[in-house]
Image (spheres, rainbow, N blue to C red):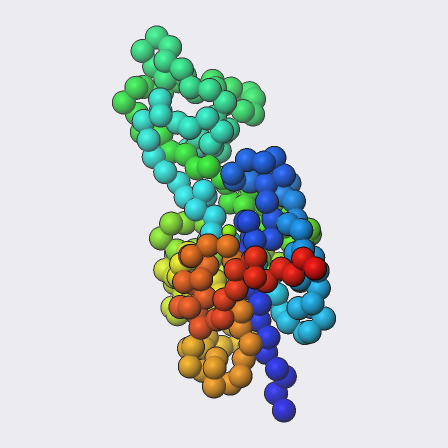
Amino acid sequence: MPQEIKCLVVDKDNTLVLPKSGETFVQAPDDQVLIDGVSKALRQYVDNGWSISIASNQGGCEIRTCHPNALPVGAYYLDRDTPLKVEQVAILHGKVAIYTNPQPKDIIFLPLDAIARFQYKTIDMAISEMRFAMELTGIQKGYFCPDMAGQECYAVGKSATAEVGEVSPVTRGLYRKPNGGMLQEALFDSCGEYLTAQEIASRGIEFLMVGDRQEDLEAAKKAGAKFKYRTQWIDLD
Ligand SMILES: [Mg+2]
């Protein structure tokens, strides 16, 4: 009798954790606090033999471009490939002065018509953020998609380094929710195969996604998983 497969995939933001700061988005890897009832809900699944992983879109890692005077404060200006946090932007002597952190390169001057590259979050920050959420929840594996085109997937495990998930021809381009690639990878991790919704049903595999947004629901549908909103999933009694 083959072992029963039970695979639970949980969205991170506003499903497992909230920003501790009260901001809309997590400001730093440790700016996360568990939502009431999450620990209890997770424990029930662990006790019932489910394997659990996190799946999170991290589109803030996407590298964007803009005129330097439009650089958003708090984002990371990419000086070649070095991310420097933008503290302030000003026009000085006909140039754009970008005040950055950390030192020593604290002010960078660019022509007004230059094109600046930036990202809201670095990959390293997204990895640390995932790891912090894994510590809070006790979940052992987390997937995140850093690009808007869904071409890349990072799998964060217990080991010190995150691995770029092996890019599979099945899931390539489908990592970003509302596509189902991260969920398919999580199920692959449980059963060693990429399965269609029909195969999942006919083999009696239990496959559930929990999230807070329509995109989570759609990802579940595409990957052949059942879906629950966090509010249905958490039993606060
Ligand atoms: Mg969410």
Instruction: Find residue 107 and report its horizontal and vertical position in percent.
Output: 47, 18
Q: Is residue 104 left or right of residue 194?
A: right
Tell me what residue is drawn at x 36 percent, y 60 percent: 173
Instruction: Find residue 62 and report its horizontal and vertical position in percent.
Output: 41, 44
Foreground residue among 205 and 113: 205
Residue 92 vs 161, above or below: the answer is above
Tell me what residue is drawn at x 55 percent, y 40 percent: 26
**Furthest residue toward top:** 93
**Furthest residue toward left:** 113
Residue 47 vs 86, above or below: the answer is below
**Furthest residue toward bottom:** 1
Q: Is residue 188 visible?
A: yes
Q: Is residue 105 left or right of residue 47?
A: left
Foreground residue among 140 and 200: 200
Residue 134 vs 46, above or below: the answer is above
Q: Is residue 164 visible?
A: no
Instruction: Find residue 193 and report its horizontal and vertical position in percent.
Output: 49, 77
Residue 154 vs 112, above or below: the answer is below
Tell me what residue is drawn at x 42 percent, y 57 percent: 215
Instruction: Find residue 32 and report its horizontal and vertical position in percent.
Output: 62, 43
Foreground residue among 181 and 23: 23
Tell me what residue is drawn at x 72 percent, y 71 percent: 47
Label tally? 0
Snapshot quadrant of residue 210: bottom right
The image quadrant where one finds the N terminus is bottom right
The image quadrant where one finds the C terminus is bottom right
